[in-house]
Image: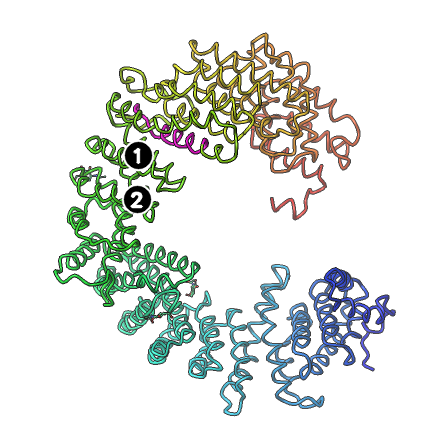
Amino acid sequence: EKTSIIKKNKPSVFSFANFQALHQLYYDPNIENKNLAQKWLMQAQVSPQAWQFCWALLSPDKVPEIQYFGASALHTKISRYWGDIPTDQYESLKSQLFSQIACFSSGSKMVLTRLCVALASLALNTMPEAWPGAVAEMVRVFQEEGGGVDGRARCLALLELLTVLPEEFHTSRLPQYRKGQVRGALGREWGSVCPLLQQLLRRADSPGAVKARVLRCLSSWVMLDVPLNESESLVHDCFSALPDPELFDTAVEAIVNAISQPDSQRYVNTLLKLVPLVLALQEQLREAVQGGDMETCHGICRIVVTLGENHSRTLLEQVDHWQSFLALVNMIMFCTGIPGHYPVNETTSSLTLTFWYTLQDEIMSFESERQAVYLQVYRPVYFQLVDVLLHKAQFPSDQEYASWSSDEKEQFRIYRVDISDTLMYVYEMLGAELLSNLYEKLGRLLTNTEQPTSWQVSATQPHTEALLYGFQSIAETIDVNYSDVIPGLIGLIPRININNVQLADTVMFTIGALAEWLADHPVMLSSVLPLVLQALGNPDLSVSSVSTLKKICRECKYDLPPYASNIVAVSQEVLIKQIHKTSQCMWLMQALGFLLSALPVEEILRNLHSLITPYIQQLEKLADETPNPSNKLAIIHILGLLSNLFTTLDISKQDDESGEGSAPPVKTTPPPPGPNPVVVVLQQVFALIQTVLSQWLNDSQVVEAVCAIFEKSVKTLLHDFAPMVSQLSEMLGQMYSTIPQASALDLTRQMVHIFASQTDHFPPIKALFELVTSVTLSIFQQGPRDHPDIVDSFMQLQAQALKRKPDLFLSESLDVKAVFHCGILSLKFPEAPTVKSTCLFFTELLPHCSDVPPVARVVQEDGKVLIQALLEGIGGGVSRSLMDQFAEVLFSMNKNCFSLLTLWLKEALQPPGFPSMRLTPEQKENFSQQILSRERVNKRRVKDIVKEFTLVCRGLHGTEYAAEY
Ligand SMILES: *[C@@H]1O[C@H](CO)[C@@H](O)[C@H](O)[C@H]1NC(C)=O
Ligand SMILES: *[C@@H]1O[C@H](CO)[C@@H](O)[C@H](O)[C@H]1NC(C)=O
Ligand SMILES: *[C@@H]1O[C@H](CO)[C@@H](O)[C@H](O)[C@H]1NC(C)=O
Ligand SMILES: *[C@@H]1O[C@H](CO)[C@@H](O)[C@H](O)[C@H]1NC(C)=O
C-alpha cells in the first residue's frame, strides 16, 4: 500500500458502490441516465472528496473508463484547485503521479495521457521555485531501469509527458506574471529535451512509432518559442524524415511550426540553411504530382509557403542569396500552378495565394531605388503568375463541371474570388501594363482564324473566359480611365463566340465593371448594349445581365435616352414572360427608374404608362378577388415593382447630386415645369390602392408593401410629393384607425418630417398626427404588450414631432399627459428597441418645458413618475446595454428642470430598498450628489455615473463581469 498523505484523508462519501452503479448508469442506453451520470461525475470531480477517491479509481481492477475519470479528476483538482494542496504534500503527490504514469505506460493510452496532463499541470504550478529542473527530473526518472516496465513503454510515456507539457502550458490558467516565469523556466529546460529527441530520432533501431512521437514532441516544444538556432539540427532531421511515409505528416507539422515561430526571423543564418533543404524537396513534389498523391503535394507546399510567407522580407534582404530565394519563389509558382482543377484534382494551389500578396507587399515597401532592382527581377515573375492564376481560374469542360457536387462548385467559386483578389493586388505592382497584356492575349485568341473547337482548349495559355475574368477583377475595383486598351477590349467583345453560360456571365460582368468608363465614353454604349439586352432574355444569365443593365442605367443615364424605348421594350417583354426571379425583377425596375429619370417629362409619362399599365390591370383584377395566399403574393409582387421603380425615378437630380441629409433638403434646382410624373402615376393608382387595402387591411405584409410605395416616393420626391399630402394623410388615418400597423406610423413620421413645418400642409398632417395618437392611446388603454412594434414606432413618431414641429403639442385635442404616461409604460418594456425609442421621446420632450405649456404642465405634475421609472430601470429593471440612453434622459432633466429634479431625486430615493436592495443610504446619497453636482453639464460624465451606479445596484461593481462590458 503506497502512502500518500492525500490518500490517507477521511473516507469518501463517494463510495465505490456508487461508482459501480455509476458505471452501469453511464453505459445505460437511455440517454437521460447517461446525462445524469455525466452531471454527477462533474459534481464529484469538483468536490473536496475527489482528492481521495480519484486514486482508488485508478486501481488496476477498474475498467479504463473509471480509471480515466479518476485521472481527469486529478487533473481538474491540480489545475483548478491548486491552492487546496498544502505545500508539504507536493512531493508525495508528485511521486504518486510518477508511479501511476509508470504503471499506465503499458496500460490504457487514454488514462496515461490524462495522468501526464495532471503531472504537467503540477509541474507548471511548482516550477521554477518548488520544483527546479522539473523536465530534467522527468527525463531522469523515466530513463531509470526498473518497475518491471519495458524500456520502450517508458520511453513512449516520457515522450507523451514531454509533449503535453507545453500544450498544458498554453491552455493553463496561470496568472500573467506566472506565465512569463514559467515560460522562461520551460525554455531553459529545452537543454534537457533536445538531446533526448535527437538521440531517439537518429538511432537506427528506433521504431517508426517512437520517431513519430519524437516529431510530435518537437512540434509541441517549438511552439514555446524555442530559438530556431537551437532546434536547427532537429529541424534538419525532420527534413531527413520526410521521405518516410510513416513520418511525413508529423515531420511537416514540426517543420511548419518551427519556421512560423514569431521569433524565428531573427535567425537569418538558420533560415538560409533551410532554403536548400526546401528546394531539395522539388523532386519529391514532382513525383507526388505525377503520382496524384495529393497529401504529399499539400505537405511539401505547406513547408515552402510557410518559409516564403513568414520570411520573405528577411530572405529578400539577403541580396547575396537572391538566386536561391528566386528559386524558392519559382517553387511556390509550381505549387500555384499545380495541374488539375481546384478543389477536385488538387487542394494545394489555394495555400499559395497569400504568399504572392505578402511578397508583393514587401517589395513595394522598399525605398524606390531598391524597389526598382527587385521589380526588375520580380515583374516577369508576376506576369507569369497572372498566366498561371488565370489558367487555374478556368472552368473544366461542361461535362466535367456537371459532374461536380454543389459543394465543389461553391468552393471553386470562392477560389475564383480569391484569385480575383490576388489579381487586384498584382495590378498594384504591374499597373496598366497588366491590362495591355491581358488585352493582347485576348486579341490574339479572338482574331486567330483557327477557331478552337471547344471554348476552353487544353493549353497552358488562359482562355477567353479566364482572360475576361481577369480583366473584370481589375476593372471592377480600379479606375481604368487611363488604360488605353478599354476601347479595343470593347471592340473585341462582339467577336467572342459566346457558347457557354459561364463565358456569357463573365462577358456580362465585364461590361458591368466598365459602366463608369462607359459614362465617360458614351459612344461605346452602342457596341455593348445589344449584348446586354439579348442576355436579359436568358434566365441562366439573370443575375449577371440584370445587374449589368442596372449599373449601366445608373452610371450612363444621361447618354441612354436614344436607347430608352428599346431598353423599356425588352425589359417589359422579359417581365411579362416572367424570365427572372423576384429580386432580379426588382433590380430591373430600379434600372428602369434610373433610365426614365433622364428623359423629358412627357417621355417619362409615356414610358411609365406602357410599363405599368399591364400591372395596374392585373392589380385591378386581384383587388376584386377574395383574398387567398396566392393572390396575396401577386399583389405584394406588383406593389414591390412599383416601389422599386419609384426608388430610383428621380427627375430632380438632373444637375444636382446632393440632397441627402437629416433636415428636409431644400431643392437647389427649380422643379421642371408641370407635375412630377411619379405623382401623376400615384394619383392615377391611388383609388386602386385604396381598393386593394380595403380587402387586405389586416394583413401587415400588404399594408407594409403599400406604405413602402409611398415611403420610397416621398424619399425621392421630397417636396414634389406635396400634391398628395392631404390625400395620403386621409388614407393613412383611415388605415390606422381601422387596423393599427407599425408601418403606417412610420410613414406618418416621414410625412411629419418633411411636411409638418410647411404652413400649407400643416392642417392635414396635424389631423393625421392627432388621429394616430388618439388611436394609439386607446391601444395603450387596452394593454399594449402585444404590440411592441407599434409602441416603438409611436415613440419615434412622437419624438420626430417634438423635434420637427413642437406646435403639434399645443393642440387642445392632443392628450399630452396620456402620451407622457404611455412613455412611462414603454420604458418598462422588455424589447430594447422600444425602450430606446422611448428614451429618445423623453430626450426630445424635456427641452420643451420652456416653450410648450402643455409639456411644461405635465412634466411639472408627473416628472417624479419619470424619475422613478428611470431609477427602476437603472436599478436593474432594464438591460445594462441601455444605460447610455437612460443617462441621456437624466442629463436632459438636469438641463431642463434642475430644481425639480433635485427635489424628486431626493424623494424617489427615500424608500429603503429602492431601486435596489443592495444599496446603502450612503450610496444613494452619493449618486444624487454626483448627478446634481457641477459635473451634470458633462454628458459623458453623467453616463459614467449612471453606469457605475447601475453596477452597484446589480451587485456587479468591481467584478470581472462588469469589466467585460
Ligand atoms: C542562438 O542564438 C543566440 C543569440 O540569439 C545565441 O546566444 C546562442 O548561443 C545561439 N545558440 C546556438 C546553439 O547557436
Ligand atoms: C506564417 O506562415 C503560415 C503558413 O503559411 C501562415 O498561416 C502565417 O500567417 C504566417 N505568419 C506570418 C507572421 O506571416
Ligand atoms: C481531375 O479529376 C477528374 C475526376 O476525378 C478527372 O476526370 C480529370 O481527368 C482530372 N483532371 C486532371 C487534370 O487531373
Ligand atoms: C476619364 O476620361 C474622360 C475622357 O478622357 C474624361 O472626360 C473624364 O473626366 C475622366 N474621368 C476621370 C474620373 O478621370
Quarter of the image for residue 548 reads top left
Quarter of the image for residue 728 reads top left
Magenta segment boundaries in residue numbering? 635-652
Point out residue 623 in the picture as x, y percentages from the top left corner. 46, 25
Amino acid identity at mark 1: Gln
Q: In the drawing, does residue 118 fall left or right of residue 382?
A: right
Magenta stretch mostly in which secondary structure?
helix
- Residue located 30% across and 31% down the image: 594
**Which class describes the residues within 10 Å of circle 1: few (<14), some (14-19), or many (20+)?**
some
Residue extending furthest toward the bottom: 205
Q: Nearer the viewer, residue 840 or 201?
A: 840
**Which class describes the residues within 10 Å of circle 2: few (<14), some (14-19), or many (20+)?**
many
Describe the element under mark 2 as helix, strand or loop: helix
Q: Which residue is mark 1?
A: 572
Is label 2's Cβ within 8 Å of ligand 4? no
- Residue located 54% across and 29% down the image: 699
Q: Nearer the viewer, residue 311 or 935?
A: 311
Give the number of the mark in front: 2 or 1: 1
* Image quadrant in which the N terminus is located: bottom right
Describe the element under mark 1 as helix, strand or loop: helix
Point out residue 813 in the picture as x, y percentages from the top left corner. 59, 9
Amino acid identity at mark 2: Ser
For the residues marked 2 and 1, what is the alpha-carbon distance in whole angstroms? 15 Å
Q: Which mark is residue 545?
A: 2
Point out residue 905 in the picture as x, y percentages from the top left corner. 70, 23
Task: Report how many numbered discs are placed on residues in the image.
Answer: 2
Point out residue 18 in the picture as x, y percentages from the top left corner. 83, 68
Q: Nearer the viewer, residue 664 or 536?
A: 536
Q: Which mark is residue 154?
A: none
